[in-house]
Image: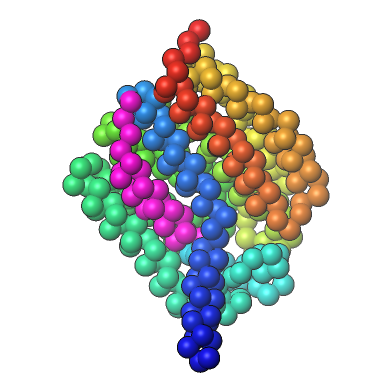
Amino acid sequence: MLNIDCYLMLLGSIKNMILITRPWGFIMPTICVSLSYVLGFYFLKIFNLVFYILTLIGVILLNASVDVMNDYFDFKYKVDTENSNTANYRLHPIIHKILSTKQTLIYAIILALIALVIASYLTLSRLYALPFGLIGLLFVYMYNGPPFLLKYRALGEIEIPITYSFIIFASYYIATGLLSYIVFIDGLPIAFLITSILIANNMRDREKDEESNVKTLAILFPRFTNILYLSLIILSYLILIPLAILRYIPLLAILTMITMPFAINKALFISRKLPKDSDPQTANILTLFGIFYIILILLSGFVNITF
């Protein structure tokens, strides 16, 4: 009986260690990496399954690292408390006593280091894999680590789209061995939607962040932020048209726009009601868009449809 109890406790601990990395957020790195690899297949007919899996694991670990580190710094700077919205809808490693403050930081570092080990291995075939991994790690730290503290200085909304656009750019390099500005541009719709997730989080937490002396666009320019949130989601769809005209994406990818009514209705609801799970709900928009965008580009690699 004791062995069964120990086993159940171990399973519970493992589950909690996974949950504090916010696994529902893994859709962001998954979409970024998958987009890069299907673009590599569409443009060059290149797809290395082993590289795809390693890149995906590495970027997911990096994403998990930034989320755990985010909880560490938010707790340290008294942004996350027992009364914050964050503690009401998900596990927080420190507030819910899963890990101590020091253990939370160590956990974030371990996740990042494993990602860098994977990047080091990929460097054997892709020379810039490790340097790109280190740049990604720097972006992770700059978000809310001292002395940068971009999140607390209303600069997070600028850094996030740059970070995820870079992830798409770097993943395409690992997929193909080539550097391409076109892929950076093709990733803008995804970067815009990921930024909208952050904005939804900041709009919801506006009052609490203000009490904690945190500066976000939602605090400095509340009306503008609301408009920006809706605009980024709409722009993510509209930009598909010029991308297709310029032949940066296949014509078939424009069909992603059939998900636009759902996205707009969901975004309007979130911007008006600001539910506790505003960011996961916005992530649902990204998920639907990303699935259609990736599958349609992948199909275009098999079926040549032109103007």
Horizontal side, residue 67 vs residue 114: left or right: right
Q: Position of residue 178 (x, y in %)?
A: 28, 31
Residue 274 in the image: state x and y as whole percent.
76, 51
Residue lying furthest top in this view?
307
Residue pictured at 33% horizontal, 25% vertical:
45
Image label count: 0
* Residue 99 seen by the camera: no
Residue 226 horizontal/vertical position (percent): 73, 42
Q: Is residue 83 left or right of residue 170?
A: right
Instruction: Say if 213 sits above or below 304 in the image.
Output: below
Residue at 47%, 47% (x, y): give it.
29
Q: Nearer the viewer, residue 130 or 150?
A: 130
Q: Residue at x 61, y 49 (%)?
A: 198
Residue 22 picture location, percent across and down: 55, 60
Q: Quadrant of residue 288?
A: top right
**Residue found at the very far front of the displayed protein:** 1
Question: Looking at the rendering, which quadrant does residue 231 occupy?
Answer: top right
Is residue 214 magenta-colored?
no
Instruction: Reply above or below: 112 against 295.
Output: below
- In the picture as drawn, the residue positioned furthest to the bottom comes out as 2
Give the vertical position of 271 relative to 298 (above or below): below
Identify the magenta region.
45-67
Extreme residue in the left direction? 124
- The one nearer the camera, 199 or 45, is 45
Q: Nearer the viewer, residue 233 or 213?
A: 233
Q: Residue at x 37, y 61 (%)?
A: 112
What colour scheme was applied to this rendering of the protein? Answer: rainbow
Magenta segment's dominant SS is helix
Horizontal side, residue 289 vs residue 147: left or right = right
The answer to whether one can see residue 252 in this image is yes
